[in-house]
Amino acid sequence: MNLTGRHLIGNRESASSASSFSPANPSLGTALEPCYFEATEVEIDDAVTLAVAAFDPFRRLIAEARADFLDAIANETLALGDELLQRASAETGHPLPRCASERDRAVLHTRQFAELIREGSWVDARIDLPDPTRQPLPKPDVRSLMQPVGPVAIFGASNFPIAISVLGADTMSAFAAGCPVIIKAHPGHPGTCELAARAILRAAASTRMPEGVFSLLHGKSNEVGTRLVSHPGITAAAFTGSLGGGRALFTVANSRPVPIPFYAEMGSVNPVFVLPGALRAGASRIAEGFVAALTAGVGQFCTNPGLVLGLESEEWADFSELAREKVTAFKPATMLHAGIHGAYQSGISDLMTRESVELLGHSAIDADPAKCEAAAYLFQTTQQGLLGDPTLFNELFGPVSTLVSCGAPSDMIAIAEKLEGSLSATIHGTENDLAEYRELVTVLQRKAGRLIFNGYPVGIEVCHSMHHGGPYPATTHSHFTSIGTRAVSRFVRPVCYQDWPDTMLPMELQNANPRGIMRLLNGERARDELAF
């Protein structure tokens, strides 16, 4: 497929700006063709105007039609074949097997959303039947369900060019809800975004979706994203990226004359607590798994384990030495782009100067900055050192972590209390450890969105129960997830119908329950038809 570098606004292409940028191959430092144009204010307005016009026709489609659209997207994604994988690899430095895994994950998630809306119970239909004889006032007929909010703006992640970008759960959950989508393509992998967007547009055409159900806009400047989130036709937005970028757009979303929900996933330090029973049972195994998680994807996961805590002991010393050896063996690899590489190198240089930490080990092979390569680093500190330097609680995006030696269980609890909101928190231990450290578990339940036992935070399972979120600053709203089918909840709102005629109700609320979904009927779950 010939890439054009143009915006895809509904069924037409556009490139009216004189300003453009070129993506780069991070491992070679060379520019990739074609160049991509900055979206103008007119092009942004055109995309949103089309989305607003498409909203009512799209949301009124039967669930089966939207599900067919999602399945068609999955099929068109697979039809891209190696071209998608090769372009993603060239733009990000990810090896081809990683890109293939991302593609398969995106397809799986897309089909999960199709199945979800076919089954239908996700709309949370509720019916409270009337009682005209109730005193002192008759009870009305009250029914409600979730309905889509409107056009959604989505910003893809730099570190997942396929699975958390144009083809990610943000896009598919919005489609599942019945919302048109406008994607702000990530400037680090615009070619991958264009290929994915064209797959979605082909799926939209083959399933006869209304024009404007999907558009793709490019831009390297912050202005494009700001204008998109500011547009009065946008009703919600989702973002995956840095704390600075997410916070800036969150402010824009809340400063509008009519504020909108802005769902940002911004990463976290993802602490790992290694309890005594686990160290005695398998320090080597835990160290191996920890370093594998630390260095996976060159440390470029929002769930990268940035702090590891254990009680001072001979076993903890052994664990630290084993982790150091494995970090030393890590061969430097290419990061996503020069910006991330530069920020990582700057962060490492800063850590080297801090008295609160000590370098424990790093990759034995030197990294090549010309290839945007990153070496792995392991630092160590004490509970006093960590609590005395709040900057050590901040995420540094890349293959770096800090081991924290604690003198007593109370030290772990004190550190847990100081943690900011995190996407995950991990405990390695035995069942007896969990009972003994119950207070630590209680604190972590307040601090993290996902609690992991004897595992590692990277490698998120794409399933219905997954929650990928957490208290601020991990996300801007801890109630919602950006992975798993609960992600659809971000783009709907409850609508209540009081004393409406049955024929004018949404299908899911009608007496006959023609879709056969599970409903909350007078407070109890049931699929019953209602006879009057």
Image: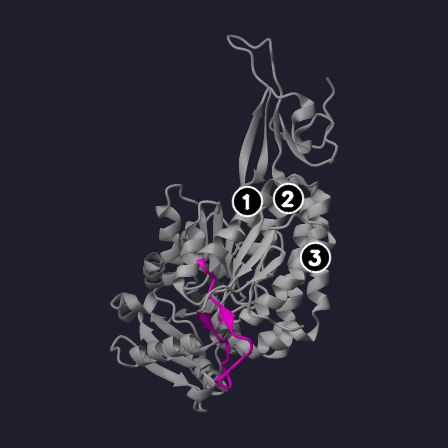
Q: Determine the image quadrant of residue 389.
A: bottom left
Q: Is residue 477 above or below residue 378?
A: above
* Left or right: 170 as drawn, with respect to 199: left
Q: How far apart are marks 3 and 1 (CA)?
A: 20 Å
Furthest toward the bottom, the residue is 365
* Nearer to us: label 2 or label 1: 1
- Are circles 2 and 1 on residues that touch, CB within 8 Å? no
Graded by Cα atoms within 10 Å as few (under 14), some (14 to 19) or many (20 or more), the crowding at tag 1 reads many
Instruction: Looking at the picture, tell me which residue is in the foreground, 411 or 59.
Output: 59
Which stretch did the figure color magenta?
19-40
Graded by Cα atoms within 10 Å as few (under 14), some (14 to 19) or many (20 or more), the crowding at tag 2 reads many
The label shown at residue 203 is 3
**Residue found 51% across the figure and 70% down from its top:** 36
* Nearer to us: label 3 or label 1: 1
Kindly report the secondary structure that dominates the magenta region of the rendered protein.
loop
Q: What residue type is labelled 1?
A: Val
Q: In which quarter of the image is the N terminus?
A: bottom right
Residue 168 image offset from top left, x and y in percent: 58, 60
* Left or right: 378 as drawn, with respect to 151: left
Instruction: Report helix, strand or loop for mark 1.
Output: helix
* Residue that numbered label 2 is attached to: 58
* Residue that numbered label 1 is attached to: 52
Q: Which amino acid does label 2 sit on?
A: Phe
Q: Which amino acid does label 3 sit on?
A: Ala
